[in-house]
Image: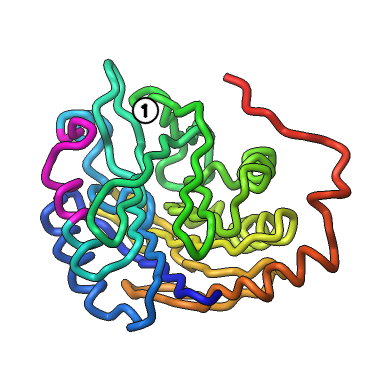
Amino acid sequence: MTAQLTAVQLSSRQTPEQNLERVARLLEQLPEQRPQLVVLPEAFSCFGAGDRAQQQMAEQPGEGPVQKRLAELAAQHQVYLIGGTLPLQAGERFAAASLCFGPDGSQLARYDKIHLFDVDVADNTGQYRESRWTRPGNQIVTIDCGFAVVGMAVCYDVRFPELFKALRQAGADIIALPSAFTQVTGAAHWHTLVRSRAIEQQVYMVAPGQFGEHENGRKTYGHSLIVDPWGQVLAEQDHGEACISAEFDKVQLDKIRQQIPVAEQGRFHVSLTQ
């Protein structure tokens, strides 16, 4: 079965309303083919406002204007829509939650980012400590969309191949990777990491990113990608806000997995530990 895969690249601002307007305009450009999976980048609803501001605007799970608008857009366009990440209330910290809505507007899944970006980078920000304000998730998540099983991951997760192996073990055919890679780490590693995860696990990767310089001075890499299970880049957007699309081909996926049966030949099984 074939379906359409779409990644939406943004340069999100601090105001959710403004970002949702941009998303709505871009979704008007979607290809007509259905079924279709559409993935927004990490922090699509708010970027550059600071962690304290994100905690203040964090919505209750299942409630709030951002979640409502995502559900409306999924139903309007009759697509499976993964809303990158948005802050949801989670006690003293917020969760960086990636939500999937179905073509009827219902919420199908929630994935909380597991691996948090606590690193030092040679850029104008210098130090990133995501865990100060963000509560990490501890569950892998897949969604059966009928045409394929979609696994959910976010940005820094891509550096931890065991998560992607666990998603493949759980049946994933496609992995959504909404991201906001820094300019420095993106230029060094982005293409290699995304293509490697696709090749290793024999999955399609839909990896939209943030791009450009944001209101807090942080610079993100862009270069949103759709990669097939052979590691071929099917679509790429280096800069600028845009939708990119490519075809999901289940026949091709099955053929690659039959010819090089790494899932059956692997000697190690991955289990998630907290």
Q: Which residue is at a point 28% across and 42% down the rendered structure image?
A: 86
In this rendering, would 1 be left or right of 129?
Answer: right
Q: Position of residue 251 (x, y in %)?
A: 66, 75
Residue 101, compared with residue 204, is above or below; it is above
Residue 70, compared with residue 51, is above or below; it is below
Q: Which residues are magenta?
A: 57-71
Which part of the image, by quadrant, shows the C terminus?
A: top right
Q: Position of residue 161 (x, y in %)?
A: 68, 43
In this rendering, would 230 be left or right of 70?
Answer: right
Residue 58 lies in quadrant? top left
In this rendering, would 36 be left or right of 155?
Answer: left
Q: Position of residue 221 (x, y in %)?
A: 46, 61
Residue 186 lies in quadrant? bottom right
In this rendering, would 7 be left or right of 187?
Answer: left
Q: Within the magenta stretch, is there residue 169?
A: no
Q: Which residue is at a point 74% across and 55% down the rendered structure image?
A: 200
Q: Within the magenta stretch, is there residue 66?
A: yes
- Farthest residue to the top: give it: 92
Which part of the image, by quadrant, shows the N terminus?
A: bottom right
According to the picture, the residue beneath numbered tag 1 turns out to be 134
Q: Which residue is at a point 24% across and 27% down the rendered structure image?
A: 89
Disc 1 crowd rating (10 Å Cα; few below 14, some 14-19, many 20+) is many
Q: Position of residue 11 (x, y in %)?
A: 30, 62
Q: 188 or 160, which is in the foreground?
A: 160
Q: Which residue is at a point 69% across and 38% down the rendered structure image?
A: 162
Q: 223 or 60, which is in the foreground?
A: 60
